[in-house]
């Protein structure tokens, strides 16, 4: 119990609890509107804003030293095991071999310093054999272009979940 | 009333923008190759194999032509017939330019694919298609240099002793003998024609 003499002036008696004045109905409505707007506006924006990327290409680089690390018994995965593309806007996989040795990728052999550019024109899931992965495979998923609001919302939500799961 | 107008002013442009992008056709990557491309292109690995024309064949023989390399085998029931049918259609669509294109079909099953068998099989699709076979070690060496994988497996067809799982992409070699690109399995005929056309028009 704080001695009443040391309490700041509140205009209340010592034993009386302070209760803030209730919101008026107009204030409550405004707060609800603000909250609804704060939720709805980003959702509408995510649903209607078109899906765009800076480039059509998704660069996937096999870093220098990958083969040496594997040979040394390092089983850690440095490269993503799945790559997502979007038809029409981000539909080209650009695979660069920056390692010192040739690497197998899908149906072919990539020499050091060489790049393989593969455009995707159909929605598909493609499993490529890849010697740069400890699992030996890379999954490339070409998703259809999300054109309708619900598809865009869905696509953005999945993208956000994927990036959250990476961190 | 004013608030309703404000909401409309915010939401309607978004709807209009969304509708515009919804009806707009996705961009097509028409300028470049529709199949895979190598940058920079390297010399296509050389080989000397037994041709279905009864001669030894090398890639060097076809300098000045665009060469399509296919790895497959004549008993293939799932991949090769589709690819060969697509190539037959592509040749027809190319018209007279097809004379500057040469398909070389390299077997992954030398035990069953001799030159005669290859000739008989390929002629049914197009008489200009050329088969290539050889001793297993030579063929394996060619497969390795192109990064092609082939493995004997149990055949689903009980009448065949075995099948071969093999890489299904086509390799494109330009007129200068450089390995320029690859065409994944089941690529539409028009896309194959598009890429061949680009290669035929390429000067270097």
Image (cartoon, rainbow, N blue to C red):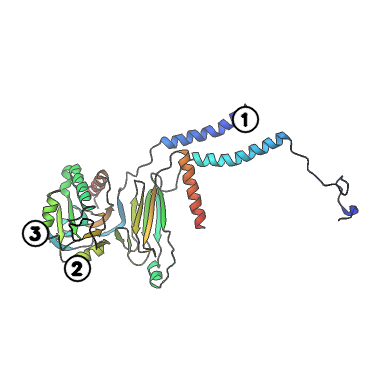
**Percent position of residue B90, x then y:** 21, 45
Q: Does label 2 lie on the same chain as label 3?
A: yes
Q: CA distance from mark 3 to mark 2?
A: 20 Å
Q: Which residue is mark 2?
A: B137
Q: CA distance from mark 3 to mark 1?
A: 85 Å
Q: Residues within 10 Å of mark 1 (few under 14, many from 20)?
A: few
Could you say which is closer to the camera, residue A143 or residue B202?
A: A143
Which disc, if any, is residue A39?
Answer: none
Q: Residues within 10 Å of mark 2 (few under 14, many from 20)?
A: few
Q: Is there any visible trace of residue A100 in the rendered image?
A: yes
User: Does A48 appear above or below A69?
Assistant: above
Q: Chain of mark 2?
A: B
Q: Which residue is mark 3?
A: B54
Q: Residue at x 76, y 39 (%)?
A: A22
Q: CA distance from mark 2 to mark 1?
A: 80 Å
Q: Residue furthest right?
A: A5
Identify the element where label 2 is drawn.
Answer: helix
The N terminus of chain A lies in quadrant: bottom right
Could you say which is closer to the camera, residue A17 or residue B125?
A: A17
Q: Which residue is mark 1?
A: B3
């Amino acid at each position: 119990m704080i001695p009443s003499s040391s309490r700041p002036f509140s205009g209340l008696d010592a034993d009386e609890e302070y209760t803030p004045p209730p919101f008026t109905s107009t204030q409550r409505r405004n707060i609800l509107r603000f909250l609804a707007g704060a939720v709805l506006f980003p959702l509408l924006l995510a649903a209607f804003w078109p899906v765009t990327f800076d480039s059509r290409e998704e660069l996937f680089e096999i870093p220098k030293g990958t083969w040496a690390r594997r040979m040394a018994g390092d089983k850690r995965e440095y490269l993503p095991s799945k790559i997502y593309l979007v038809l029409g806007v981000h539909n080209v996989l650009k695979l660069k071999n920056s390692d010192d040795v040739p690497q197998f990728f899908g149906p072919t052999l990539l020499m050091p310093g060489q790049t393989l550019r593969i455009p995707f024109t159909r929605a598909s899931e493609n499993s490529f054999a890849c010697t740069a992965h400890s699992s030996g495979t890379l999954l490339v998923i070409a998703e259809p272009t999300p054109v309708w609001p619900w598809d865009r919302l869905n696509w953005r939500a999945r993208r956000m979940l994927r990036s959250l799961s990476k961190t | 009333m004013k608030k309703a107008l404000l909401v409309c002013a915010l939401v309607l442009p978004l709807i209009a923008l969304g509708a515009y992008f919804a009806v707009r056709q996705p961009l097509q990557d028409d300028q470049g190759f529709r199949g895979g491309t190598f940058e920079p292109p390297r010399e296509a690995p050389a080989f000397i194999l037994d041709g279905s024309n009864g001669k030894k064949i090398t890639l060097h023989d076809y300098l000045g032509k665009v060469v399509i390399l296919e790895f497959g085998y004549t008993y293939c029931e799932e991949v090769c017939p589709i690819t060969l049918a697509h190539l037959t259609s592509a040749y027809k669509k190319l018209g007279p330019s097809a004379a500057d294109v040469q398909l070389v079909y390299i077997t992954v099953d030398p035990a069953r694919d001799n030159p005669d068998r290859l000739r008989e099989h390929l002629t049914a699709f197009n008489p200009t298609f050329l088969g290539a076979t050889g001793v297993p070690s030579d063929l394996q060496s060619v497969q390795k240099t192109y990064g092609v994988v082939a493995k004997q497996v149990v055949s689903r067809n009980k009448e065949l002793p075995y099948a071969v799982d093999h890489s299904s992409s086509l390799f494109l070699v330009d007129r200068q003998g450089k390995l320029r690109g690859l065409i994944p399995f089941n690529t539409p005929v028009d896309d194959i024609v598009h890429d061949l056309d680009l290669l035929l028009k390429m000067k270097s």
